[in-house]
Amino acid sequence: MIAPLRVVCVGGGLGAPTVMAGLRAHTPDITGLIGVTDSGRSTGKVRIALDVPAPGDIRNALTVLAEGDPVLTRLMAHRFDTDKSEDLNGMAFGNLFLAALTQQEGSFLRAVEEASRLLKLRGRVLPVTLYNTHLCAELADGSVVEEEVQVRGVGKAAITRILLKDDSVAATPGSVEAIEAADLITLGPGSLYTTVCACLLVPQIARAIANARGLVVYVANTTRQPGQTDGLSLSDHVRAVQDYLGGSGLDVALINSDTPPDHLRRHYAAQGLEYMEPTAIELETIRGLGVRPVAAPVIDKWSGPRDLWLKQDTIRHDAEHVARALVSLLDERRPALRAL
């Protein structure tokens, strides 16, 4: 019997969970390796009040892999709606739940493990680090901004480099081993600097991915993002990911080939999120970086814009289409292996 695919999905937000949601139909062995430097919205409030790593993206990943009581799964994603409390309005219950478990268990990792047990996960979720650190960025004008909400802020100079506020941030136990054992490691999709590359700032994580035996795939963003990637191209995105991997280790960039409808392009372009065309020149530039560009129809063209509660929406990826493209890449590489 062929062993199931071993997959590690690196990122956060709604991007990595989308990939995880698609791949769970192909394998039970998924590890979501999720960033913890978010500082906005309800996550930021919990971090300030309770001194824990950012729980929001962990919460999203847990609910995607949950196979337990659907009421508890829905409860994890529930946001309070009240005009009586500014702090409670919009707060995700799951963020409070993880913070409470951290206090009870004495460890953020134990909190995530207990939440995973209660939700009966098909797979595993790990934070990239247990350090309650913040993301910072050096800008083109020489200034430095601190905390993720400022790094992604609009109207500032271009980002030249991101870094963590604390030195010697270590990877969560078990994360490097998961990468080393994986048949497939996916990066993204998601905000280039505040999600994807932020995870690669943990040196042990970047080094493990760069040296991985498995296939390393960057699921490329579909649009530019104001405040982070204004003016950047697809190849610039790939170059940045490769840079934060130490200059090598990225095998494939999975790029959307299915042109979005005009009404979606116009809607997002009006907000500064311009669609990045996968032109022949761009694909050749990516090849020149030592990365194989693979174009496939991986977006959801039929769903309208989402209200993400103070978070920027974009053209989303389709979980099933992304998973199909990824499994196809693995089948090319390992013809004897077939997904469950």
Image (spheres, grey):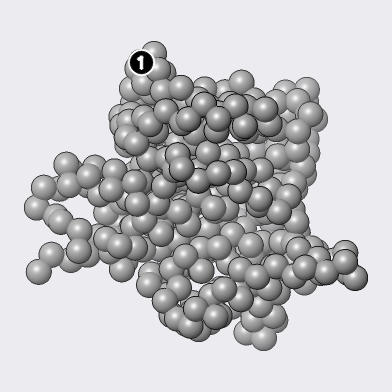
Quarter of the rendering containing residue 121: bottom left
Q: In this view, does 179 lie above or below 254?
A: below
- Quadrant in which the C terminus is drawn: bottom left
Q: Nearer the viewer, residue 145 or 69?
A: 69
Q: Is residue 317 above or below residue 337?
A: above
Q: Is residue 107 above or below residue 24?
A: below
| Percent position of residue 61, x then y | 51, 63
Q: State left or right for residue 242 relative to residue 275.
A: left
Q: Measuring 55% from the left and 30% from the top, which residue is drawn there?
A: 263
Q: Which of 77 and 112 is in front in this view?
A: 77
| Percent position of residue 259, x then y | 42, 28
Whether residue 246 can be seen here: no
Q: Measuring 13% from the left and 64% from the top, which residue is drawn there?
A: 2
Q: Measuring 72% from the left and 40% from the top, which residue is drawn there?
A: 151
Q: Measuring 48% from the left and 83% from the top, which residue is drawn there?
A: 69
Q: In this view, does 87 lie above or below 328?
A: below
Q: Which of 190 and 319 is in front in this view?
A: 319
- Quadrant in which the N terminus is drawn: bottom left
Dot 1: element = helix
Query: Mark 1 highlights which residue?
Result: 280
Quarter of the rendering containing residue 291: top left
Whether residue 4 can be seen here: yes
Tell me if mark 1 has few (under 14), some (14-19) or many (20+) residues whose alpha carbon lies within 10 angstroms of its own: few
Q: State left or right for residue 24 relative to residue 230.
A: left
| Percent position of residue 138, x then y | 72, 33
Q: What residue type is labelled 1?
A: Ala
